[in-house]
Amino acid sequence: HDARVELYISRGSGMEAETKAIFDRLHENREDIEREFGDSLIWERRSEAMSSKIAYVISGGGYRDEEKWPAIHDAMIDAMIRLERAMRPHINRLP
């Protein structure tokens, strides 16, 4: 019973090393990103997978809690705006 917003990182099949390098470059700036975001994020490098992700979990309800959807949607929109704002300068500096 939660919702989440995330940055999913995958350069595709056969590009796992590049995907991990992107994640690592972002992770080097974890403190700055989380400070700008305003909270801690979940950093999942997923070494054995083709992808990695950076996520924020919103507690207090999920897809089964239809009566809470408006509040959940508002929280997700707010979190996604903050995540994009925190990530954008770092993503723009990626090679």
Image (tube, helix red, strand yellow):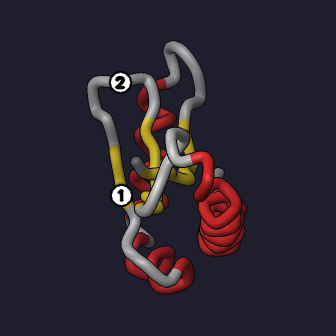
Q: Is residue 10 above or below residue 89?
A: above
Q: Which residue is rendered at x = 43% and y = 51% of the image?
A: 2
**Sequence-first disc among 2 and 1:** 1
Type of amino acid at the residue the image marks with label 1:
Ile
Type of amino acid at the residue the image marks with label 2:
Ala
Residue behind mark 2: 49
Quadrant hosting residue 40: bottom left
Asked if residue 58 lies left or right of residue 93, the reply is: left
Q: Which residue is rendered at x = 50% and y = 75% of the image?
A: 33
Asked if residue 36 lies left or right of residue 70, the reply is: left
Disc 2 + disc 1, Cβ < 8 Å: no
CA gap, disc 2 and disc 1: 16 Å
The x and y percentages for residue 61 are 47, 55
Residue behind mark 1: 42
Please, what secondary structure does the residue beneath circle 2 have?
Answer: loop
The x and y percentages for residue 66 are 61, 46
Q: Which mark is residue 5?
A: none
Camera-side mark, 2 or 1? 1
Asked if residue 93 lies left or right of residue 5, the reply is: right
The x and y percentages for residue 56 are 46, 60
Q: Residues within 10 Å of mark 1 (few under 14, many from 20)?
A: few
Q: Which residue of the protein is positioned furthest toward the top in this rendering?
A: 13
Viewer-proximal residue among 7 and 28: 7
Quadrant hosting residue 39: bottom left
Q: Which residue of the protein is positioned furthest toward the front in this rendering?
A: 67
Q: Residues within 10 Å of mark 2 (few under 14, many from 20)?
A: few
Q: Is residue 23 above or below residue 90?
A: above
The reply to whether residue 89 is in sight is no
The x and y percentages for residue 70 are 70, 60
